[in-house]
Amino acid sequence: MVVSTQALNAIPKDIMTKLWTAKATRVSLKQIYTIGRHVVGSNNKGALVIPAQFLADELPIRYTNVVQMLNSAQELPHQALSHTPTFRKVTQRYLEDIHALTRMPRPDTTAREEQFTEVLRSLQRRHRNNILSLGQSFKELYAINHVTPNDLDEVKTQRFFDKVYGLSLGTNLLIGEHIALHDEGRNLVQKISPISVAEKAVTDARGVCAAHYAREAPSVQIIAQDSTVTTTYVSEHLHRILFEVLKNSLRATMEFHREGPAPPLKLIVVQGGEDVSIKVSDQGGGIPESRTKRIWSYVTGKDTQDIVDPASAISGDSKVSEDVKDYLELPLCGFGHGLPVARLIARYFGGELSLVSMEGFGTDAYLALYRDDTCPENYPEMISETPLTLDHLAASSANTPRLPTDLDLSLEGEVGVLGHSAGAGVLTS
């Protein structure tokens, strides 16, 4: 793995050594919700200082975990991937983010929390670019090295994307929660109504399919034994899961019933003792048993699901919510990864997403949301054997000029020189 000497040398070696061996703090929905409610209830921006200090300590560890993964030969689907120009830029940007976070003054006052939140906004934008860039790096791998998807190690590819998206999901939730509390006085983790979220996901999925096929999408009948069911969850996460499931079910139904009216889908919501369960049933012809496992594959998912390219289906007059437009721009849904990522999201806080298909008739998708909100996040395990070898990492680019002392964290130049405190707030011991 080739890591820029510029970005690497910008981080003091003692700080990087601590970060390399540190463990991420796994949080639960209950912890995020409780802190958020405290901040909202206090009606005081000063209450954001403690959560900001936690993020100041936690984010460098999580970004270092990403660098560890990108630096590990065991984690990459193909060894040539690490030599593509865009992949190397992504690694450098993560190092730049670590550098910027560890140089900031500790956010121990409301003024410093304001400054820290501005940095979080920039990190959120950079995260979007990093995820998009990883997709570009695979295109470069195919074009420059004449590699095809069949040349990738399927087990490593599955593990690679599970970890990339897993690291992204948890970190982005923590950043988004803080920004939502700061800007809107609301928390992302809430007591939500799954039925209300399902209604919105139905509207959005039907809108995308109608725009793509230029005809009305099948209706979706929502059935619930108890219309007042609630659970602690992230509404955006549930919406994304249901949107992906519904999009695929609607697509299959419209393809299978090209002549005449398509039968409606059924979405059933049930509250159990341990789970809130949601079933989506379609009559879209089902999936052959030989192709069922490939539905969850990042390598071969494109030819078995996500036939509808949702991003291309969005037009200026499409009746699709801004939330959907926002995450349809990301490769979480744009590389044929919709259902694998939906399952990963479901599993992140102890839930599950599964499919049961009857070829020739249709498919049932089962989503279980674990109601125990003390369940910690399913943060990816890092390979412990990956050592920190700064000299080795930098060896192949030793003649590269060092980074300027002050890094511009923002890709657009919106965040300039950051305060210097020689790693204040990082793993104090």
Image (spheres, grey):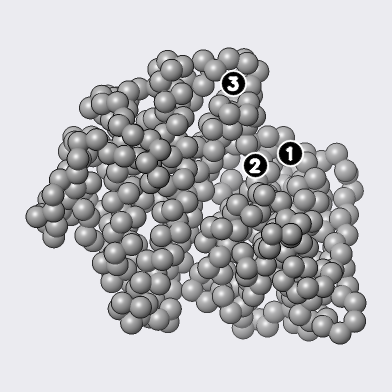
> In which quadrant will I find the N terminus?
bottom left
**In this figure, which residue is indicated by the disc labeled 1?**
192
Tell me the CA gap for discs 2 and 1: 8 Å
**In this figure, which residue is indicated by the disc labeled 2?**
234
Tell me the CA gap for discs 3 and 1: 19 Å
Q: Nearer the viewer, residue 159 or 258?
A: 258
Closer to the chain start, of discs 2 and 1, is: 1
Q: Is residue 111 above or below residue 17?
A: above
Q: Is residue 289 above or below residue 228?
A: below
Q: In the rendered structure, which amino acid carries the disc numbered 1?
A: Ile
At horizontal 68% and vertical 43% (from top left) the residue drawn is 235
Residue 385: % across, % down: 26, 54
Q: Which mark is residue 39?
A: 3
Helix, strand or loop at mark 1: strand
> In which quadrant will I find the C terminus?
top left
Tell me the CA gap for discs 3 and 2: 17 Å
Helix, strand or loop at mark 2: strand
